[in-house]
Image (spheres, rainbow, N blue to C red):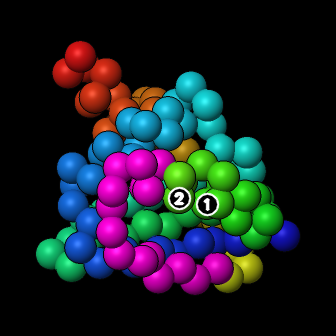
Amino acid sequence: MAVAMFMHWPGVTSDQYDAVMARLGLDGNPAAGGVLHVATLTDEGLEVCDVWQTEQAFHSFLEQRMLPVVSELGIGGEPEIRLVPLHNLYAGDPDMIDRIGAVSLPAAAAAWAS
């Protein structure tokens, strides 16, 4: 069953988030079972909402890919994670995704900078 994942990670900065995304290389090596990723940064830290095909897919990505990268980069703190069954996924303008492109903005910015 598809799930929505909500993450609150106090203290994470935009530079730290961008470094994680660049190191993960999701554009070239997407997460198995990942459907959608939306992230925002607030004064408190990182807020993420993902859609995953299964809870197991999320946990596999978290343990095998994301947490090792976070550790390598020395990012501290613990994320607060909540998984709930997905009830609906609606895109008001699905063509916008094609116009924007299915790329990670931080990873794209890192590529442009190099």
Residue located 61% across and 31% down the image: 29
Instruction: Tell me whether circle 1 and circle 2 mark residues in contact (CB < 8 Å).
Output: yes
In the current view of this chain or complex, which residue is farthest to the right? 1
- Residue on which disc 1 sits: 62
How many numbered marks, from 0 up?
2
The answer to whether any part of residue 19 appears in the image is: yes
- Residue on which disc 2 sits: 67
Given residues 62 and 94, the one toward you in this image is: 62
Question: Which mark is first along the chain, 2 or 1?
Answer: 1
Q: Which picture quadrant has residue 59?
A: bottom right
Tell me: 58 left or right of 111. Answer: right
Please tell me whether residue 58 belongs to the stretch shown in magenta.
no
**Distance from label 1 to label 2 (Cα)?**
6 Å
Given residues 60 and 87, the one toward you in this image is: 60
Nearer to us of marks 1 and 2 is 2
The disc labelled 2 sits on which kind of residue? Leu
Residue 66 image point, x, y percent: 54, 53
Residue located 67% across and 82% down the image: 84
Given residues 15 and 92, the one toward you in this image is: 15
Identify the magenta region. 69-83
